[in-house]
Amino acid sequence: MKNFALKSITASLLLAASSFSFAADVEMNADANDLAIKGFDPVAYFTMNKPVEGDINFTATHKGAIYRFSSESNRDKFRANPDKYAPQYGGYCAFGVTMEKKFDTDPTAWKIVDNKLYLNLNKNVQNRWVQDTQGNIDKSDDIWGDIKDKTLEELAED
């Protein structure tokens, strides 16, 4: 019985340790299952000009985050050039980055500027962000390099 318990504990520890190797990069906004953009298709923002929920049957990973797509074609476009379609700032709120924060996003609060996808916490925050879109992008671009590798806990301490 002790041998079985020891094997079970060892298997559990190995499984837990291996799960860390698949976790999304710290710079990526993903849920506990490493799902990015709450399952919305990042390519659809560009091709359909609207947020579209992805299908669990069409997925790809980028920087450890899992993206879902509404079609095989969209998945293949993403795989060919993920940096073209992935949201800026790892999918964190573009306005939050101006405040040196990593806030979650609402996939329906979005905007494409210069062929780049930006997401915001919600539509109220987005309304503030679009009042000076280019100024906010410039500020976020400057700040992102300093905060992208920090965890949410580290940013909360700052």
Image (spheres, rainbow, N blue to C red):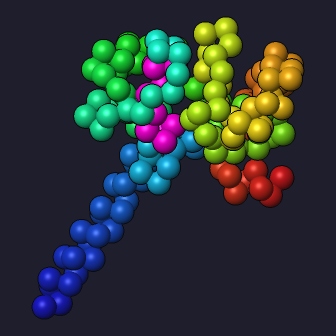
Residue 15: x and y in percent read: 30, 61
Q: Is residue 67 left or right of residue 109?
A: left
Q: Check the image and report above or below for 120 versus 50.
A: below
Q: Is residue 44 magenta?
A: yes
Magenta segment? 36-45
Residue 32: x and y in percent read: 47, 54
Residue closer to the observer: 115 or 143 = 115
Determine the residue positioned at 80% across, 40% down.
100
Residue 118: x and y in percent read: 65, 25
Determine the residue positioned at 53% across, 16% down.
49
Rendered image quadrant of residue 147: top right
Q: Is residue 35 left or right of residue 92?
A: left
Q: Is residue 144 magenta?
A: no
Rendered image quadrant of residue 127: top right
Determine the residue positioned at 47% across, 15% down.
48
By secondary structure, the bulk of the magenta-drawn segment is best described as helix
Determine the residue positioned at 38% across, 32% down.
54
Q: Check the image and report above or below for 130 versus 28.
A: above
Residue closer to the observer: 16 or 40 = 40
Res 101 visible: yes
